Image: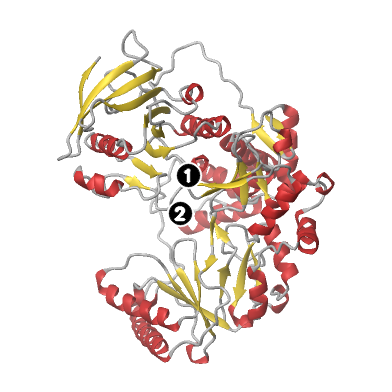
């Protein structure tokens, strides 16, 4: 979205001893909030949050946008709005925000605003009108800084698109779909990636292809079209934190090739014939008037009709106005009951329900509170707005009120932490929190509960992935389907899994590579394996990563197994800190040079099954079967 090199050059100029480095493909740079850090880390601590335009500090925990960074290093800019920061950047720093907008200007496109994280136009009923479509970069910037999406009006921009979804099709459509894809690629026109893995192929509008919007061409190709009466979202729009992005922005927008046009017309022509036949058949066989709804004969609600309608009304009254609620109940009354109640009864019922209707402000307060409870730490008004879809002024109002009440603790400029009320009990919990499955290798020496973290360490090349796959196999044998996250580039886990007789259906794997461990979202009540984690001697990074994982597990439950890098002498990095977080910490150590005989040196057991806090689990590895088998426990 921005010229990153110019941005980092700006930070280097403003921050003394500024550093920027890269670890395992992850960019790290000096935190603009560094003057407020309690101690100085040995390496940069600010990183980019994948899939977003935000940065996160592994030490102080702040979440910054680019504009927040500028406010942090230039105190006189703290009172400026984002749009004013943009003007400052463009005029004085020569940093061009959203350079793709300049290309849209060159294409002569007309854009309009789309709701945040949505495909729905802000002016839903007016988006086709000229006054709501603009060829002005200033307008586009204003929308983007309000966290809105952008859409291209096909008619005013003289373009059309073919939307090729990345979805599986049934066998009868596979050959035709492949042929269609080859024709699209052969055009070499402008192409955009969509958040869900599909592609937009952009063409100059063609009069001969003047048909209505088509969804799922051919009835099963998973290909849509957008023509002169339609629109499509364009970068940097996003859906659920996944962005649209261009494959070849700046490329020439081509006309539809004769071959592709012929194929489109063939498919649409056959569709129209089928649709005409279906319409004629329906008209010939239709004998039921559309208003003749089925009745509840004999008043099936006899004796409970009033209670049923009140329960339904109680649901509707918190989502609709009293007038709308009365209308809905009236429709149900007259159209579904053979013997409708008098209208006076419906009116009296609606009036009695108004007392149960929550005020809009109470509803908003609950939404924001639940969002804060979910986010827990580093709560920023923009994050709450994105989650609740409420106006930013409403969000700020309630956050400020929660802060005064002591529900939230202000940690910095516009950043809060949630302070959860302690619920006290003086009796044993009714439900056990015990993890219901056996934990491979360690079941005999420790008790495990929902939300526990296991730490397993090994040096480079000492079998962390083999151990992970063996754990997956043993969990699969118990009917559990684990989640496996590989943070190691070039990991050959699939080869190891295959050697153990595991298939891709036996465990879940993250589709996209995860670079920042503080962005891992744990699935509720799951067995999750992270292979592997390296934080080195960096105290701040280790603390931030494990605190995040502990908070995530406390909320989600299940078991998390984290594989950690060890030194070549089998010692931990940041040993005192790294062992303070997990329920069990162990190192896998080779006992001979062949790698066949080894053992888990268990250094910490939070809840042991005996009078010990450490243990040894001997194992034997088979190079033929790739099985790591547990032997005796000492």
Q: Is residue 456 above or below residue 97?
A: above
Q: In this view, does 383 lie above or below 559?
A: below
Q: Position of residue 221 (x, y in %)?
A: 35, 73
Q: Do the residues labelled 1 and 2 touch (CB within 8 Å)?
A: yes
Which of the two residues, 494 or 293, is positioned nearer the viewer here?
494
Q: Residue at x 40, y 31 (%)?
A: 566
Q: Where is residue 495 in the image (x, y as percent from the top left)?
A: 25, 49
Q: In this view, does 227 lie to the left or right of 610?
A: right
Return the mark for residue 43: none
Among all residues in the image, which is located at the extreme left? Answer: 624
Q: Find residue 424 and report its image quarter.
A: top right
Tag 2 residue = 337
Q: Which residue is drawn at 56% across and 82% down?
A: 159
Which of the two residues, 477 or 620, is positioned nearer the viewer here?
620
Among all residues in the image, which is located at the extreme right? Answer: 76
Q: Is residue 436 visible?
A: no
Q: Is residue 501 left or right of residue 219?
A: left
Q: 10 Å neighbourhood of mark 1: few (<14), some, or many (≥20)?
A: some
Q: In this view, does 294 lie above or below 607?
A: below
Q: Quick one: SS at disc 1?
A: helix
Total numbered circles: 2
Query: What is the CA distance from the residue labelled 1 to the residue labelled 2?
Result: 10 Å
Q: Quick one: SS at disc 2?
A: loop
Q: Can residue 365 be seen in this view?
A: yes
Q: Where is residue 109 in the image (x, y as percent from the top left)?
A: 64, 78
Q: In this view, does 515 lie to the left or right of 373?
A: left
Question: Colour scheme used in the picture?
Answer: secondary structure
In which quadrant is the N terminus drawn? bottom right
Q: Which residue is drawn at 38% across and 54% down?
A: 297
In which quadrant is the C terminus drawn? top left
Tag 1 residue = 305
Q: Where is residue 81 in the image (x, y as percent from the top left)?
A: 79, 53
């Amino acid at each position: 979205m921005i010229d990153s090199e110019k941005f980092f050059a700006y930070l280097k100029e403003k921050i003394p001893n500024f550093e920027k480095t890269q670890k395992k493909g992850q960019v790290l740079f000096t935190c603009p909030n560094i003057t407020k850090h309690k101690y100085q880390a040995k390496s940069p601590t600010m990183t980019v949050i994948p899939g977003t335009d935000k940065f996160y500090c592994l030490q102080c925990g702040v979440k910054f946008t680019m504009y927040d960074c500028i406010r942090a290093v230039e105190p006189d800019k703290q009172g400026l709005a984002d749009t004013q920061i943009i003007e400052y950047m463009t005029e004085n720093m020569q940093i061009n925000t959203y350079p793709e907008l300049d290309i849209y200007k060159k294409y002569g496109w007309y854009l309009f605003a789309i709701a945040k994280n949505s495909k729905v136009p802000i002016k839903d009923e007016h988006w086709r009108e000229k006054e709501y479509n603009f060829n002005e970069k200033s307008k586009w910037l204003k929308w983007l800084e309000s966290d809105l999406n952008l859409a291209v009006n096909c008619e005013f921009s003289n373009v059309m698109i073919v939307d090729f979804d990345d979805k599986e099709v049934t066998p009868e459509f596979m050959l035709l779909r492949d042929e269609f894809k080859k024709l699209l690629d052969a055009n070499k026109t402008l192409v955009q990636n969509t958040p869900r893995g599909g592609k937009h192929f952009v063409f100059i509008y063609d009069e001969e292809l003047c048909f209505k919007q088509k969804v799922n061409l051919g009835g099963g190709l998973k290909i849509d079209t957008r023509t002169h009466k339609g629109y499509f979202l364009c970068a940097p729009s996003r859906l659920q934190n996944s962005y649209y992005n261009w494959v070849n922005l700046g490329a020439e927008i081509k006309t539809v090739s004769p071959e592709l046009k012929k194929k489109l017309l063939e498919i649409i022509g056959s569709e129209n014939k089928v649709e005409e036949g279906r319409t004629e058949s329906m008209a010939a066989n239709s004998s039921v008037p559309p208003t003749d709804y089925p009745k509840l004969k004999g008043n099936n609600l006899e004796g409970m009709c009033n209670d049923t309608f009140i329960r339904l009304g109680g649901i509707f009254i918190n989502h609709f106005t009293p007038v709308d609620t009365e209308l809905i109940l009236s429709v149900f009354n007259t159209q579904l009951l053979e013997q409708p109640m008098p209208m006076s009864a419906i009116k009296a019922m609606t009036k009695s329900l108004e007392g149960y209707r929550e005020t809009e402000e109470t509803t908003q307060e609950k939404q924001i509170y639940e969002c804060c409870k979910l986010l827990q730490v580093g709560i920023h008004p923009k994050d709450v707005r994105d989650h609740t879809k409420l106006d930013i002024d409403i969000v700020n109002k309630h956050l400020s009120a929660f802060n005064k009440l002591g529900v939230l603790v202000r940690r910095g400029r516009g950043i809060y932490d949630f302070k959860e009320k302690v619920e006290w009990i003086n009796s044993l919990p009714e439900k056990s929190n015990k993890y219901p499955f056996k934990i491979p290798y360690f079941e005999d020496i420790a008790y495990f509960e929902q939300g526990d973290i296991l730490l397993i360490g090994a040096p480079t090349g000492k079998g962390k992935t083999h151990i992970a796959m063996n754990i997956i196999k043993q969990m699969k044998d118990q009917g559990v389907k684990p989640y496996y996250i590989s943070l190691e580039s070039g990991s050959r886990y699939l080869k190891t899994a295959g050697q153990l007789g595991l298939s891709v259906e036996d465990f879940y794997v993250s589709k996209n590579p995860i670079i920042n461990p503080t962005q891992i979202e744990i699935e509720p009540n799951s067995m999750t394996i992270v292979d592997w984690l390296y934080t080195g001697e960096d105290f701040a990074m280790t603390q931030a990563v494990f605190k995040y994982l502990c908070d995530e597990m406390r909320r989600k439950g299940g078991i998390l197994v984290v594989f950690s890098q060890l030194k070549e002498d089998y010692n931990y990095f940041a040993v005192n800190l790294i062992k303070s977080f997990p329920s069990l910490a162990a190192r896998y150590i080779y006992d001979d040079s062949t790698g066949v005989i080894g053992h888990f040196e268990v250094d910490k057991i939070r809840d042991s099954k005996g009078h010990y806090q450490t243990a040894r689990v001997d194992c034997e590895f088979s190079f033929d079967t790739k099985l790591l088998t547990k032997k005796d426990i000492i």
